[in-house]
Each structure stands twice: as C-alpha cells, then as structure tokens.
Amino acid sequence: MSVLEIPIRKLNTGASVPGIGIGCASNERTPEAFRATKPWILNAIQSGYRHLDTASLYGTEESVGLAVKESGVPREELFVTTKLPWSHTSIFWKSLYDSLDRLDIDYVDMYLMHSPMSWKYIGDGFELDKIFPRDSDGNALLLDHPNFSDTWATMEMALATGKVKAIGVSNFSIKNLEKLLETAKVVPAVNQVEMHPLLVEEELLQYCKSKGIVVVAYSPTGFSDVLTLPLIQKLAEKYSTSAVQLVLSWHIARGVIPVPQSTNPGRQLQNLTLPVLEAEDVKAISSLDQGKRLTQKIDEKDGKLWGAWTAEQLGW
Ligand SMILES: NC(=O)c1ccc[n+]([C@@H]2O[C@H](COP(=O)([O-])OP(=O)(O)OC[C@H]3O[C@@H](n4cnc5c(N)ncnc54)[C@H](OP(=O)(O)O)[C@@H]3O)[C@@H](O)[C@H]2O)c1
C-alpha cells in the first residue's frame, strides 16, 4: 500500500498542528489508572506522535507532562491540548492554572471549552460526582452564568497570558457556534466533536471550514459499530490495512484531525501508517452516515445528555 504522509494543518492563529493526535484519556478513573497512562503516552511520543489530546477531567494531565519531559522531544515540536471542564466554568482561572501545574509545562498549544454546558463547581477532584454534580434528587446542577459566551470571553483573555497559545471549543453544534460567534472577538481555532463513519457531520464540517475552524474528531474509530460494517471490512481488505487504519485515513482525507487513543505500542504505530484512499472510497465511507452518536448519547428516557441538556439545546 502507498503510505499517507500525515499532513500538518494550519490553525487560524497561524500555528501548525500535526494532522493526527494521540487521545490521552484513561479507561479507568482511579489515581493508579491515571498514573498508569504515562508509559503508553510516552511510547506514543517515541513512536512519532507530536499532538497529544488530554483534558482536566481525564486525570491524565500529569502523565502527559511527565511523558513530554521524559521523551526529550523539544517542547516546541509538540502540540498539547487540554480542556476546561464543564463544571469549572465558574472557576476558570483556577482550573486553567491547576491544569498547567499538573502538566508542569509553561503553556498549552490549545485550550478547549470541553462542552457548551456549564455545571456548578462543587470542588476539585476527578470523581464522577464532581464532574457531574447533582442535587439530592439527582438533577444536574447547571448554571445560567457563566454561559458558553461568557466563558468564551474569559478564554479570549487567557490568550493574553501566553499560557494558552490558541483557544477552541468541543462538542459545539452549528447552532451553538452561531450563538458563540455573535459575541466572540476571537473565532475558535478548533471544534473537537464526536465523528466517525456513522456520524459524518458533513454540514458541521463544512460550516467549520467556512469559518476557518479546524475540526478534530474524537472517538474517531467508531468502535466495533463502524469497524465491523461490511463496506469498511471490504475496503480494509482492498487497501490491505486494518479497519481502524482505513477509517483514520478517511478522516484525514476530509481535512479532519483524528485523535485515536491506543494504549498498545503496535496499534499506536499502525495508526500512523495509513493508506492513501481513492476519492470514491472516501465518498463511499461517508455514505455510511446514520447520524448516530456512540459516545455522547441522548438518554431515550429523559431526552437529555447526562440528565442536563436536551438535543435541542445542544443543537443536535
Ligand atoms: N472532547 C470530548 O468530549 C471527548 C470525548 C471522548 C474522547 N475524546 C478524546 O478522543 C480520544 C479518543 O476517543 P475514544 O477513546 O473515545 O475513541 P477511539 O480512539 O475511537 O477508540 C479507542 C479504542 O480503539 C482501540 N484502538 C485504537 N487503535 C486501534 C487499532 N489500530 N486497532 C484496533 N483497535 C484500536 C483502542 O484499544 P487499545 O488501546 O487496546 O489499542 C480503544 O479501545 C480520547 O482519548 C480523548 O482524547 C474527547
């Protein structure tokens, strides 16, 4: 197979960002599990990844910072993203400086608002009750202020500190981007959203491109829901690759930056060794779209995401 040269994308800030990143979430939420992520994050850097995607609420910022140091790769050759939790919107500056402390690096290349939702802050920590605070009846503790437009204005101020080289959003729909842009002085550099062949998001992608916003795809493999589809299997065979490699190449062909996560050295390397797809195959993979979310799903019983926002509020 001819191997794709992973592109370098340009952000609206003028900065460059590697066209694939390594997802750095932890599969389990214990301090031991968080610490156990360092070796595979370090291995990813040693294997050639130069773009690392973490978040305050993943519990892996410390591991990412340690891996960056131990790798010996000059800081300016790495692109590090972290994210403001939805439950930290009311303590923005503390949350940002806590992230920088945990990472123990001078600056992040990208700071994302993790969600358009704003939840109450009830204390530090990575426990789920801190991330999704609820009252005694189990209702989500949501804030009207700061809303995402207010938070964005604070993020714009953070740019001036030099601790944050670019700012962006995550889980934003066209509807919420339009609202954000009504008052924004700075256009988000990135919108990180769930995206895979069952959730192609063509309209959102074209909208973001028209505004100069780079789209980053999370859950980019689409898991077994995507990987076992007959067309995916057939095309993987045609290109003599795995289904994951095929799907990652599809993202790149669409101008999207996937951030696949793998803790496995062999699969990390595989995910950097991608086939060059014919245009008609890119189109065929896109035609698998079902608008189906696999990671952030609306609960059928209450019609909400995490008991908080409805599909309408999210613009889904
Ligand atoms: N902004 C947000 O709200 C948000 C939400 C979710 C995720 N994210 C980001 O996106 C990243 C990735 O998302 P994700 O973990 O949900 O989905 P993903 O990267 O699509 O899937 C990860 C799974 O795929 C497996 N895998 C990876 N490469 C493979 C390969 N070549 N062959 C076979 N299996 C392979 C991994 O297993 P092994 O580890 O065993 O290889 C792991 O089980 C996260 O780490 C995080 O950085 C962001």
Image (cartoon, helix red, strand yellow):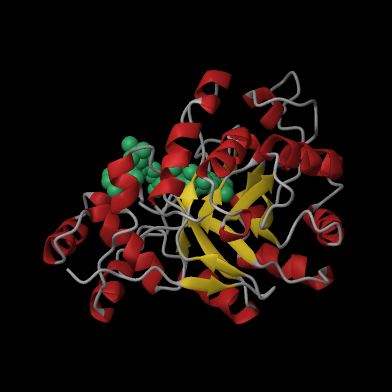
Height in image: 173 above or below 259? below
Residue 158 percent across, percent down from the top left = 83, 56
Q: Where is residue 106 in the image (x, y as percent from the top left)?
A: 74, 48
Q: Quadrant of the C terminus?
A: bottom right
Between 62 and 259, the residue placed more toward the observer is 62
Q: Which residue is drawn at 54% across and 69% down?
A: 204
Q: In this view, does 296 lie above or below 272?
A: above
Q: Position of residue 240 (x, y in %)?
A: 14, 61
Image position of 216 (left or right of 2): right
Q: On the picture, is 212 further left or further right than 239?
A: right
Residue depicted at x 41% and y 64%: 200
Q: Can residue 95 be seen in this view?
A: yes
Residue located 84% across and 46% down the image = 144
**Above or below for 83 versus 189:** above
Q: Quadrant of residue 173?
A: bottom right
Name the one closer to the observer, 234 or 313. Answer: 234
